[in-house]
Amino acid sequence: MHNSSTGQLPHWDMTAVYPSLESPAFETGFRAAAQAIDALVELFNQHNIARRDTLRVPLDDATVAAFEQIVNAMNATLAETRTLGAYISSFVSTDSRNNLAQGKLSEFQMQMLKLQLLSTRFTAWIGSLDVDALIARSEIARGHGFMLRRAQIQAQHQMSPAEEELAAEMNLTGSAAWGKLHGNFTSQLLVIVKLDGAEKEMPMSMLRNLAFDPNRETRRAAYDAELAAWKNAAVPLAAAMNSIKGATNTLAKKRRWDSALDVSLFGNYIDRATLDAMMGAARDSFPDFRRYLRAKARALGVPALAWYDIFAPLGGGAREWSYEEAADFVVQNFSAYSDKMGKLAERAFRENWIDAEPRLGKRDGAFCMSLRADESRVLTNFKPTFQAVGTLAHELGHAYHNLNLAPRTMLQHQTPMTLAETASIFCQRLIEHAALEKADPKEQLMILETGLQDACQVVVDITSRFIFEQTVFEKRAQRELSSDEFCEIMLDAQKQTYGDGLDANALHAYMWAMKPHYYGSTFYNYPYMFGLLFGLGLYARSQDDPKKFKIGYDELLSSTGMGDAAELAARFGIDTRSKDFWRASLDVVREDIARFEKLIGDK
């Protein structure tokens, strides 16, 4: 775990893959992956894998054999490049100043461009085949049936092969480059903040951690310094936002999608009916979340919460959690759920899968990435709070999901964000529930607050981010937007969602600049809400018949790349297109809000 003598939190161990980026073993692995991609290109050319405009490809024995050979080779190459990509990313995400890692990442992205072009060709080719006949004749095709039927739809939204190739090549110097700029620029941003009468310089990630400080003046100072820093950084970040959203609009139109949102819905395996049902239930819950925010304001003794109070701890003497205590608690309660989940957590801590120390150059937040087979790596920025314990459980939930996906091929792995949060939310709820059972009233309040903070972010704040992004896409179709306009849109979205739950004069106009979600995947927001509410709904069902649920649950996690969300949810009798399911999941949160208000009383 971590070095008790120095107090240093753990860094993840990547030597299980290669000794270092400078090692001959890494260079050999990099060359082998590049050669595997080149061999795949040759295989595609040999079988003329491309769109056929004039007639469908005859489904003879040779075509079936070519399909099986191609799929097996793609799965092997994707597995190899996944590990290599995760290895390189592990250095960039923990130190964006590492020039060697940045260089290798760029080189790797050039190789992955070839794979992306092959994927586009493969999709176009599948669109030319009789997929039903192929599935009837090939066991490999049957195992990849869902992917094949999606490829048929996707093929209808492709540009010409030459245009698709150009778009993929231009992405590296276009949207992907702007996204990289945001990540590198913000992770290296140093901010001057005045604390206790003295000026201090610190990385943005450390400054943002002061949002959890018990002293309101410290939180306010950090908030003021953060806003000033984002204002100074706004010009390049607004340029990045304009470029990414403009390119997304252009490509969506060229590919004959009605909007960027429709591209996102298809990519997340859901439809408009599901999104509308979920977002409608979320909006109906805003008055409940505002009650929670007003109750927290009473507890803090302020007339209304400012943005810098959202993450404020309640009361003095809140229990501090050391990293060892957090690890033990997670392992203990994962094990109480199942041996399989407990062993996964034990292995993660024992084999140093987790990078927990905040430091300069390391990206903010937390994530989990699949490394190889059943092995993952987790990045977090640990603080001695129960919220950090919940974050550990959340990210290890992703690792548990990866464990269940391990027997599947890479083409069966491709889980959408909507379903990617299922296990993480479930595991986080597991930990929160266990902590509540053993806590005294004061500690219960802290734990409930942690869960409600997260739920408020994922339901209320995510809706504000969704409104913001939707508005930006609409306006960007007409022209570029200034940083001031981005701020206005952001503030309007926050007022629509938080309402009188927050002080309207102390919101966060620069959330668009801070959140990396806007600079990568389109609508990287509502899938989190889907994940939270779907995970809560499943957790509630797990209490009814735990033994039966566990069997079906692991199978669900292993199938998240093999069916759309509505189809997989139906296995548990869930109708994702009905507001009732989402309302029932939010009822779990409403119960927590009522319990929270009772513990707060009339303070």
Image (cartoon, rainbow, N blue to C red):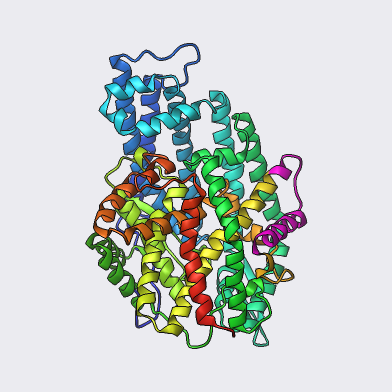
Q: Which residues are magenta?
A: 474-498
Q: Is residue 521 visible?
A: no
Answer above or below: position of 60 versus 161. above
Magenta-drawn stretch, dominant element (helix, strand or loop)? helix
Relative to 281, is 378 on the left or the right? Answer: left
State the image quarter where residue 195 is shown: bottom right
Q: Residue at x 45, y 39 (%)?
A: 111
Q: Name the residue: 50% across, 81% down.
A: 599
Inspect the magenta stretch and tell me whether residue 361 lies in it: no
State which quarter of the image contains the C terminus: bottom right
Q: Quadrant of the N terminus?
A: bottom left
The quadrant where residue 123 appears: top left
**Can residue 514 be spotted in the picture?**
yes
Say whether residue 569 is left or right of residue 549: right
Closest to the observer, 449 or 5: 449
Look at the image and say whether residue 488 sits in the magenta stretch. Answer: yes
Residue 284 relative to residue 528: left or right: right
Give above or below for 79 relative to 52: below
Q: Looking at the image, which is closer to me, 538 or 408?
A: 538
Q: Give percent across and percent down for residue 54.
A: 49, 11
Where residue 259 appears, x then y in whole percent? 63, 37
Q: 275 and 210: which one is in front? A: 275
The residue furthest front is 580
Number of numbered discs overlaid on the protein picture: 0
Q: Residue 531, position in %: x, y?
A: 46, 54
Please report the residue visible at 58 percent of the width from the left and 82 percent of the height from the top.
299
- Above or below residue 597? Residue 404 is above
Percent across and percent down for residue 75 are 33, 37
